[in-house]
Image (cartoon, grey):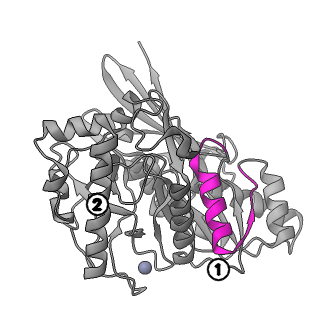
C-alpha cells in the first residue's frame, strides 16, 4: 500500500490498532476469526500488518442479523440504516454519535473535493430512509454549508421545477436517473424555449456506470458528472469521490484503508492491478469492519492526480463481482455492455439486459432505445451495428432489440437493468 506522509502513517496505525482492539474486545465473532488465524491485536504493529487480519464478508453481516457485530452498547446507537441487497437477507448498519459526525465530515469533504461550496444549492435525489444515500448527502451538504433540497427520488416534473425555481447548482442521484432527468429537461426546453437550469455539476453514484453513460449525462445536462463511491456496510456514500479532473476517486484516508485483492485467492494485488476492493474502517465505533470484502472491482491508481492532492485514488468501479454474468462461458459485466452500446451512434443509454437459460446454458439479449424516432429499416441497421459492436467488445454474440425512445421503464432509484428469466 502506498502511503502519503508520516503523519497519515502514524494516524493510520493508531486508528487501525484502536479498531482491531475494539473488534477483539467487543465483537466475539471477529475475535474468534482472529484466534482461528492465530493472531492477537499485538500482532498488528502498523498498517503494513493489515493483511494478517481475517476478512469480513457480507455473509458475516447477514449471519449477525440484526446487530450481532455491534461493538458498542445498544444505548449508544443514534441511528440505523439497512441495505436490502438484491439477493438474500437485509443487513443492518448502525451508527453512534461519533459515527454520524465522521460520516457527515466524510461527505462534506467529498462534496468539497467535487467543488461544492457553501454558496451552492444541492438537490438530493437519492432515497431518504433505510437507504444511506439521501441522509448521507443531506447531512454532508448541510455540514459544508450548502443549501440542501431534500427532494428524494421520483416526481421528476417536480424535481425539474425545484431545480429551475430554486436555482439548484449541484444534483446528487443515480447515473440512470440523471439520464432520465436530462431527457425531461430536453423535452421541457422544446415546450418552453429558454427554460434552462443553473447546474454546475452532477454527483452520481450507487450503481456502477460506464464512461459512455458519463458522456451521455454530460452532454444531456451540459455539466461535469462526478462519480462518488460508498457502501452502507462501511458507512454509506462518502468513502471516495472524483475531483473535477475525473481522474480516479480520492479515498477518505482519515477514515478508511483500501486494499485490492484477487477475488478468488484473496491475495493482495499491487497498485494498478484490478481486483476486489477491501476496506478497513479506521474510526467507526458501532460497526467497525476489518478487511471488508466489498465485491466491487477496481484498482489503486498509480501516480498523482492533476488536482495536486496526494493520497490513494481508486479507479471507477468496473462492476461488482456478483453482477458478473457468465454467458456461454464468457464473463460479462453489465457496464461492459453499456460501454459498447455507447459506441454505437444513434442509440440512447436506456437499455436492459435479459438473461435466459435453456438446458443450463445462459443466453444474453439486449433491448436498447434509439436516440430518436427511426423507421424500420434504420432500426434494423442499428440492431446489426449494435450486435457487431457487442460481439467485438464481449467476444460473444448477443441478440439486440432496438426500440423507439420511451419504450423502456425509467428508474428513480438504483437501476434494475438485468432481468433473469429461466426457460424450459
Ligand atoms: Zn484530483
Is residue 138 highlighted in magenta?
A: yes
What span is colored magenta in the figure?
129-152
Q: Mark yes or no: residue 160 visible.
A: yes
* Placement of 67 over or under 356, stated as above or below: below
Residue 201, quarter of the rendered image: bottom right
Q: Position of residue 140 (x, y in %)?
A: 61, 65
Q: Position of residue 282 (x, y in %)?
A: 36, 60
Q: Residue at x 20, y 44 (%)?
A: 54
Q: Between tags 2 and 1, which lies in front?
A: 2
Residue under pointer 2: 16
Residue 273, quarter of the rendered image: bottom left
Considering depth in this image, is 416 or 102 the residue closer to the camera?
102
Residue under pointer 1: 117
Q: Position of residue 400 (x, y in %)?
A: 48, 40
Considering depth in this image, is 122 or 416 the residue closer to the camera?
122
* Placement of 94 over or under 2, stated as above or below: above
Label 1: few (<14), some (14–19) or many (≥20) C-alpha neighbours in 10 Å: some
Single out the residue that lies furthest toward the left: 38
Q: Mark yes or no: residue 344 visible.
A: no
Question: In the rendered view, does 161 fall on the left or right side of 249?
Answer: right
Tag of residue 251: none
Label 2: few (<14), some (14–19) or many (≥20) C-alpha neighbours in 10 Å: many
Considering depth in this image, is 175 or 195 the residue closer to the camera?
175
Task: State the CA–CA distance, disc 2 to disc 1.
Answer: 31 Å
Q: Residue at x 50, y 50 (%)?
A: 207
Question: In the rendered view, does 89 fall on the left or right side of 279?
Answer: right
Q: Residue at x 77, y 52 (%)?
A: 156
Amino acid at each position: 500500500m502506498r502511503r502519503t506522509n508520516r503523519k497519515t502513517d502514524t494516524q493510520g496505525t493508531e486508528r487501525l490498532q484502536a479498531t482491531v482492539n475494539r473488534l477483539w474486545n467487543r465483537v466475539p465473532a471477529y475475535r474468534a476469526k482472529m484466534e482461528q488465524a492465530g493472531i492477537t491485536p499485538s500482532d498488528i504493529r502498523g498498517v503494513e500488518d493489515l493483511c494478517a487480519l481475517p476478512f469480513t464478508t457480507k455473509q458475516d453481516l447477514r449471519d449477525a442479523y440484526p446487530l450481532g457485530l455491534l461493538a458498542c452498547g445498544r444505548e449508544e446507537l443514534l441511528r440505523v440504516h439497512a441495505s436490502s441487497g438484491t439477493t438474500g437477507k437485509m443487513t443492518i448498519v448502525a451508527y453512534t454519535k461519533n459515527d454520524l459526525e465522521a460520516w457527515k465530515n466524510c461527505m462534506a469533504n467529498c462534496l468539497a473535493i467535487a467543488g461544492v461550496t457553501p454558496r451552492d444549492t444541492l438537490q438530493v435525489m437519492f432515497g431518504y430512509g433505510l437507504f444511506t444515500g439521501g441522509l448521507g448527502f443531506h447531512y454532508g451538504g448541510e455540514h459544508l454549508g450548502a443549501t440542501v433540497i431534500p427532494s428524494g427520488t421520483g416526481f421528476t416534473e417536480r424535481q425539474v421545477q425545484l431545480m429551475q425555481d430554486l436555482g439548484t447548482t449541484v444534483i446528487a442521484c443515480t447515473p440512470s436517473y440523471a439520464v432520465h432527468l436530462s431527457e425531461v429537461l430536453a423535452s421541457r426546453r422544446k415546450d418552453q424555449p429558454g427554460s434552462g437550469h443553473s447546474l454546475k455539476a452532477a454527483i452520481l453514484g450507487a450503481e456502477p456506470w460506464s464512461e459512455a453513460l458519463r458522456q451521455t449525462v454530460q452532454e444531456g445536462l451540459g455539466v461535469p458528472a462526478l462519480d462518488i463511491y460508498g457502501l452502507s456496510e462501511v458507512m454509506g456514500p462518502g468513502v471516495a469521490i472524483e475531483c473535477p479532473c475525473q481522474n480516479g476517486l480520492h479515498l477518505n484516508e482519515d477514515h478508511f484503508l483500501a486494499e485490492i485483492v484477487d477475488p478468488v485467492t484473496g491475495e493482495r494485488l499491487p497498485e494498478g492491478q484490478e481486483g476486489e476492493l477491501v476496506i478497513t474502517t479506521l474510526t467507526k465505533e458501532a460497526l467497525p469492519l476489518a478487511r471488508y470484502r466489498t465485491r466491487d472491482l477496481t484498482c489503486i491508481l498509480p501516480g498523482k492526480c492533476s488536482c495536486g492532492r496526494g493520497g490513494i485514488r481508486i479507479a471507477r468501479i468496473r462492476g461488482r463481482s456478483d453482477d458478473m454474468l457468465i454467458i456461454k462461458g464468457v464473463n460479462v459485466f453489465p457496464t461492459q455492455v453499456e460501454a459498447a452500446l455507447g459506441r454505437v451512434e444513434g442509440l440512447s443509454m436506456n437499455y436492459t439486459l435479459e438473461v435466459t437459460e435453456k438446458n443450463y446454458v445462459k443466453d444474453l439479449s439486449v433491448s436498447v432505445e434509439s436516440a430518436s424516432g427511426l423507421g424500420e429499416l434504420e432500426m434494423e441497421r442499428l440492431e446489426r451495428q449494435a450486435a457487431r459492436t457487442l460481439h467485438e467488445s464481449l467476444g460473444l454474440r448477443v441478440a439486440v432489440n432496438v426500440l423507439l425512445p420511451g419504450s423502456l421503464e425509467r428508474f428513480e432509484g438504483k437501476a434494475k437493468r438485468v432481468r433473469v428469466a429461466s426457460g424450459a
